[in-house]
């Protein structure tokens, strides 16, 4: 047995048990300490991927590490640590400092790590469920707030429907190929096609692509804002890594795959972008923007092409950084009493909080895809990949959808900078953790935008 | 002796699965919605065990055990959330938890 391959998971599991035991004795008084400790544990765990020798397979072939999934674990760890740092002050101010919050984020991360490392569909399922169940709880963990429970229930119901589609799809694939282990196999027949269709629907549900997006706006709006920033980033990155792997191994051998995923992509791009204009709340607007982004991302999965998939992974990571930044600004503003995230609340806040408003404007410009920011490089990569793969119509629709999306991001910026203030809220302080998160995510976006080679060249060289 | 074809197991399993999803959409009571979801999840066990019997393997049966355990975990969390909703609003119908729309 090769235990070396499991070091990041061991560190994380040990940390979870430690936090669990400490929380029993020290209670919620030490909430801030727990969160800081959790962030340190995540960072240790994500840097411990450097100690793992790869590629190797262990636990009877059920668990394998490669450069591909170690990269995913590292990136996920960084984002989770940033979310944890930005969360503590919000929960303390809202009198919702549950000690469980610190380790539930870590359990979600652990589930995703197992999911990404497994070549066996059974363990992929267990990892995905470990993460999903913890996320249902996280959405509901907001004291004295009814909306959060409603969001959690809707998320649970639709998430479980997705899970059951995932297992039924696995059953069909299992019956047609006779194995649960993923390897480059060519399946055929009705059972295989049905299985791929169901697995694709399940993953599309988890990344909130169009026909399965219903939970997204409600779960995002109901969840406490730091949890929303977690929901919008970590599962997205993790599931796109899985989606890319399954596309290469399983899905792309289906002949109608291009058509299936292409129609999902087009539908979610346009649906997300049009519905975002109708929103009254900025938090919901960002949820619809994430549906639209699910469309852009799934575009890159139409072809099992290395160039497209590397640009997809780059794009997902920088998208996660800018969404994290935007939601962090929202959570700082929400610490004011009576703040609701409605557009009217955002009127003229640039006068009161020039720095926060500029940060939000920066992240929204990044989400539009304005050049010095890294999302531009991600969009360009997907566009070039689609052109190279002779998917001209998809690439033109992609550009049109991106242009449409600019309007609603700009609307928020216009409300912040060019309107007069109507309501007055109390002052708000930015905590150390929040400022660290804002600084790191904005520098990350700028740095990766100006020197995309740092990450992109590395992703291109990854063996799949 | 005639053996049952594997398609038959999958037909039963898919029928139960669709019933579960329909229940989730049609039913109004929160607990019944949860029960329908459990039906959809556990319907897949029939397919796994049937495929195993047909192919003479065991992996599918192990997967079925995983599904049973995880379905229970999900039901526990779901019931917890329903109790929380009930404590805030004293409602138990999906028609009444519609504060967020759009």
Image (tube, rainbow, N blue to C red):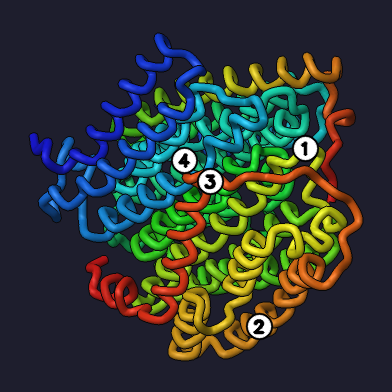
Q: Which mark is residue A337?
A: 1
> Disc 2 marks which residue?
A397
Query: What residue is at 29 percent from the left and 34 percent from the top?
Result: A12
Q: Is residue B78 above or below residue A431?
A: above
- The residue shown at (73%, 23%) is A144
- Same chain for marks 4 and 2? yes
Q: Report the front residue among A144 and A237.
A: A144
Instruction: From the image, tell me which residue sits under label 4.
Output: A84
Query: Who comes first in sequence, dot 3 or dot 2?
Result: 3
Picture quarter with the N terminus of chain A: top left
Q: Check disc 3 and report the residue beneath it.
A: A230
The numbered mark, 3 or 4, whose residue comes first in the sequence reads 4
Q: Say which chain tag 2 marks.
A: A
Q: Position of residue B101 (x, y in %)?
A: 84, 45
Q: Residues within 10 Å of mark 3 (few under 14, many from 20)?
A: many
Describe residue B50's horizontal placement relative to residue A396 as left or right: left
* SS at mark 2 in the image: helix
Q: Quadrant of residue B64?
A: top left
Mark 3, secondary structure of its residue = helix
Q: Are marks 3 and 1 in contact (CB under 8 Å)?
A: no
Q: Say which chain tag 3 marks.
A: A
Dot 1: element: loop
Mark 4, Cα crowd under 10 Å, few <14 / some 14-19 / many 20+, is: many
Q: Can residue A263 be seen?
A: no
Whichever of callouts 2 and 1 sits on the residue coming sooner in the sequence is 1
CA gap, disc 1 and disc 4: 22 Å
- Label 2 environment density (alpha carbons within 10 Å; few <14, some 14–19, many ≥20): some
Give the CA distance from mark 3 to mark 2.
29 Å
């Amino acid at each position: 047995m090769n235990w070396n391959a499991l070091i990041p998971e061991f560190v994380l599991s040990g940390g979870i048990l430690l936090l669990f035991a400490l929380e029993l004795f020290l209670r919620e008084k030490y909430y801030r300490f727990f969160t800081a400790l959790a962030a340190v544990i995540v960072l240790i765990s994500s840097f411990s991927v450097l100690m793992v020798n790869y590629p190797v397979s262990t636990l009877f072939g059920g668990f394998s590490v490669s450069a591909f999934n170690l990269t995913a674990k590292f990136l996920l760890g960084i984002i989770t640590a940033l979310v944890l740092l930005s969360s503590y002050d919000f929960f303390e101010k809202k009198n919702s400092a549950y000690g469980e919050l610190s380790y539930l984020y870590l359990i979600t991360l652990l589930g995703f790590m197992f999911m990404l490392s497994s070549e066996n569909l059974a363990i992929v399922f267990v990892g995905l469920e470990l993460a999903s169940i913890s996320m249902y709880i996280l959405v509901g963990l907001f004291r004295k707030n009814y909306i959060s429970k409603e969001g959690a229930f809707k998320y649970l119901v639709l998430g479980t429907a997705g899970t059951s589609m995932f297992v039924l799809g696995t059953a069909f694939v299992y019956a047609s190929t006779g194995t649960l282990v993923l390897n480059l196999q060519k399946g055929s027949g009705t059972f295989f096609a049905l299985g791929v269709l169901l697995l694709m629907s399940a993953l599309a549900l988890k990344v909130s692509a169009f026909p399965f997006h219903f939970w997204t706006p409600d779960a995002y709006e109901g969840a406490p804002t730091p949890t929303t920033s977690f929901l919008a980033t970590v599962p997205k990155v993790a599931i796109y890594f899985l989606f890319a792997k399954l596309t290469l191994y399983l899905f792309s051998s289906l002949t109608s795959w291009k058509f299936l995923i292409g129609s999902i992509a087009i539908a979610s791009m346009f649906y997300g972008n049009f519905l975002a204009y109708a929103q009254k709340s900025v938090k919901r607007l960002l949820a619809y923007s994430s549906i639209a982004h699910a469309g852009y991302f799934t575009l890159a999965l139409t072809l099992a092409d290395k160039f497209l998939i590397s640009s997809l992974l780059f794009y997902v990571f920088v998208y996660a950084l800018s969404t994290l930044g935007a939601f962090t600004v929202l959570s700082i503003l929400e610490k004011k009493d009576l703040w609701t995230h409605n557009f009217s609340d955002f009127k003229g806040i640039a006068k009161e909080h020039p720095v926060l408003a500029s940060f939000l404007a920066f992240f929204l410009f990044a989400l539009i895809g304005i050049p010095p920011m890294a999302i531009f490089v991600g969009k360009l990569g997907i566009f070039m990949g689609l052109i190279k793969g002779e998917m001209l119509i998809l690439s033109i629709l992609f550009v049109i959808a991106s242009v449409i999306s600019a309007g609603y991001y700009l609307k928020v910026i216009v409300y912040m900078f060019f309107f007069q203030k109507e309501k007055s809220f109390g002052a708000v302080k930015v905590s150390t953790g929040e400022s660290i998160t804002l600084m790191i995510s904005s520098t990350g976006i700028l740095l990766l935008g100006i020197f995309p080679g740092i990450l992109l060249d590395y992703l291109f060289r990854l063996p799949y | 002796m005639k053996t049952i074809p594997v398609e038959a197991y999958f037909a039963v399993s898919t029928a139960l699965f669709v019933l579960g999803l329909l229940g989730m959409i049609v039913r109004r009571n929160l607990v019944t919605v949860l029960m329908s979801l459990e039906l959809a999840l556990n319907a897949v066990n029939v397919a796994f065990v049937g495929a195993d019997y047909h192919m003479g393997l065991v992996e599918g049966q192990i997967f079925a055990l995983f599904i049973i355990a995880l379905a229970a975990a999900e039901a526990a969390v779901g019931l917890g959330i329903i109790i929380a909703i009930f404590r805030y609003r004293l409602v138990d119908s999906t028609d009444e938890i519609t504060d967020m729309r759009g």
